[in-house]
Image (cartoon, coloured by chain):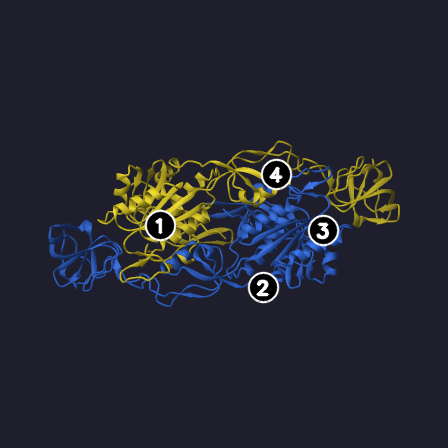
Chain colours: A yellow, B blue
Amino acid sequence: MISLDEAIKLVTENVRTLQTVRANLDDALGCASANDIRAQYPNPRFDNSQMDGYAVIAGDLAGASRANPATLEVIEDLPAGKISQKKLGGGQAIRIMTGAPLPHGADSVVAVEDTERASNSVKIFHAPSKGEFVRFGGEDIKISETIIGKGKMIAPPEILALASQGIDEIDVVRRPKIAVIATGDELTTPGQQIKEGCIYNGSSSLLVALVKSAGGVAFDLGIARDDSKAIAEKLCEGLGFDMIVMTGGVSAGDYDLNRGVLEKMGWKESFWRVAIRPGKPLAFGTLEGKPVFGMPGNPISTMTAFELFVYPAIKKMMGSLEADSRRLCAKLAGDVERDKEREQLLLADLKFENGAALVTAHGPQSSAHLKPALSANCLARIPSGDGRQPAGSSVEIWSLTKNY
Amino acid sequence: MISLDEAIKLVTENVRTLQTVRANLDDALGCASANDIRAQYPNPRFDNSQMDGYAVIAGDLAGASRANPATLEVIEDLPAGKISQKKLGGGQAIRIMTGAPLPHGADSVVAVEDTERASNSVKIFHAPSKGEFVRFGGEDIKISETIIGKGKMIAPPEILALASQGIDEIDVVRRPKIAVIATGDELTTPGQQIKEGCIYNGSSSLLVALVKSAGGVAFDLGIARDDSKAIAEKLCEGLGFDMIVMTGGVSAGDYDLNRGVLEKMGWKESFWRVAIRPGKPLAFGTLEGKPVFGMPGNPISTMTAFELFVYPAIKKMMGSLEADSRRLCAKLAGDVERDKEREQLLLADLKFENGAALVTAHGPQSSAHLKPALSANCLARIPSGDGRQPAGSSVEIWSLTKNY
């Protein structure tokens, strides 16, 4: 048995980042940038007005106030998107909208609220400082500055930055295609009649949902019966995808054939069994270079193993170089009994109270129980050892993968 | 000007939950359940074995140990999915796999590690308590118990619960179709040539990405020029959707026509201007019963207004009855200058340190600056007033909408 941290390391070492594809902004959302992307234009693009008002020369208006207004000649009314061909001289002003380029000669803007317009002139009630209400070109982003680093996930703010640069497509790392295989004679497909002693296959639907929520593209290859040939056929089919996630059949039971079949097919096993609870009977390796996960049979163990191992594998395949933002640290709200030999990953609730991140583990947990998963929002990592993990101690948590 | 809380209340009051559609599990992911969903079967479905081992009668094995093993007759080998037709009698055992139904007459399971098999008999090295390693039918979920409440968002754990019940489709509230309209003569579509004094339209791509990340379906209707007829035409087109989000043209400037056009078309304005910074010039109302947002022209203001107002509107349309899990409370890491009149929503970083949720506002912020949005993960809400909001004080935050 290896430790959780070793196992995570082995998984990410054995998974490769996929190829680059060209994507429009809509498709790029949720993918990682394949390159550093540099600014083609500064932001703001040019000196422009921060207010609706008048472009002026600050020096003309020293001492101006409501009691003692200054009067300027208005030489132009400038809407947004129109550029002035005129150069502002002493004693002159140009009517300007928010965002409009600052006319030549002007050095500041007076807000319309501090003015009173006559036909060709304007009274100014305020003495601006030089540069007041001007946004200077490049004050936010300079030309050829890196705006999005290689490996950054494209979220809405990145879409904004790209579109504002006039960019409508970029290179991203493609999303992995992931084959989901369930194994077991006892499994029945949801929606179909069920025989006594059988159970519905919840794991495949769960894995399809998890893969999708994590950014991959899932393909449900259905159920392989407990028969070496059937399992080998499904695995061969799975090799047409970027990764295989298989459930059931990796514990030490007599009818657990999957590992045997994988061995016969020549897989390179990285590890089998991890010192965690739940999720111990987890196998990981590569088959013809493709990563293959042999997940535990219990769906809750599968869910836990997905969050710990498959999620970072998907992110690496997607080219994400960002730290896993789901892994946080929180304060344990109550004592938790440790397991002597294995780290525990408990379904738990993360709450925020007065600036503290408090995590409460759900009551007695069994990997056969679904209800705790319906109200949990994270997994809390409880170290192995004697006695109890005390309330108030700091523990690592994984937020659960959701897509809303 | 109304307050942030009043404005959020008015938005959600004026938005209605959409119709119900039938969806398979794949399409249901990320939607809200339209009904309470009750268990058709208990979970576990039947008493079953928690281990690979032997189904036994605990009373037969009192005092059994390695030093003093008990021997039982093995009357059957039972794989998962096969149900025993036999009834266990005194002195008998049945070989059983994890998950297999507990045979009649058996009351506990001994793990295979605590046994030694001969051909028709097995030595048992452990005295189980009654019920040991048995998962009892219904101990997790009872028949007709509500497993998913109306308005619950369907995430991977809900998919698991449904599939485990054999359910392959449910009623969900459909996703809203949202029209995105940009307005302004100065705007150029990304990917096209740009003229001097113009800027690229970043807002439309931003809004499309935000709507998609929040669970809606976005339709980019392009740019309306600063002309009442053009704006009215786009709005008419937008009425074919469930909601309209329009950017630009709602401040007090002369060329800001949108509100005028909306008034002429007979919209019912709920509010215009909110006492927040950025995002003050925000208009909201309904046009022929459809919610319409008039967002500020600056994309960062638009992003902020989306998080505060459009996001909860989308969730209500989607039928979500859950609290907004993005609204948290964190401790301010450093002093922040207050604004005398308006609450501020500052781009900020939420970090977790030793169980504390710490939020750091980015440096000087302008709604024309994009860079702070590229590294922020939340908005921090700073109350209005004199002086500075002190470090260590508890503030509300909104996590930014991302889809990864």
Q: Nearer the viewer, residue B186 or A362?
A: B186
Q: Which residue is mark 1?
A: A302
Q: In this rendering, is residue A360 above or below B300?
A: below
Q: CA distance from mark 4 to mark 3?
A: 24 Å
Callout 2: SS? loop
Q: Is residue A119 above or below residue B8?
A: above
Q: CA distance from mark 1 to mark 4?
A: 41 Å
Whole-angstrom CA distance, mark 2 to mark 1, is 38 Å
- The answer to whether the residues at label 2 and label 1 have Cβ atoms under 8 Å apart is no
Task: Identify the amino acid type marked 2.
Answer: Arg
Question: Which numbered dot is residue B212?
Answer: none
The answer to whether the residues at label 4 and label 3 have Cβ atoms under 8 Å apart is: no
As drawn, is A327 to the left or to the right of B273? left
Question: In terms of depth relative to the viewer, which is nearer, B320 or B233?
Answer: B233
Q: Does residue B315 appear to the left or right of A105 in the view shown?
A: left
Residue B288 percent location from the top left of the image: 66, 63
Disc number placed over residue B249 in the picture, else none: 3
Spatial CA distance of label 2 from label 3 is 26 Å
Q: In the image, which is nearer the foreground, mark 2 or mark 4? A: 4
Tell whether B264 sits left or right of A34: right
* CA distance separating discs 1 and 3: 51 Å
* Residue type pointed to by label 4: Ile
Q: Earlier in the sequence, mark 1 or mark 4?
A: 4
Q: Marks 4 and 3: which is nearer the front?
A: 4
Instruction: Indicate the position of residue B31 as horizontal and vertical percent values.
Output: 49, 57
Q: Quadrant of residue A130?
A: top right
Chain for disc number 3 = B
Instruction: Check disc 3: other Cα within 10 Å, few if <14, some if 14-19, many if 20+.
Output: many
Mark 1 — on which chain does it sit?
A: A
The residue beneath circle 2 is B16
Write down the residue under mark 4. A167
The residue tagged with tag 1: helix, strand or loop? helix
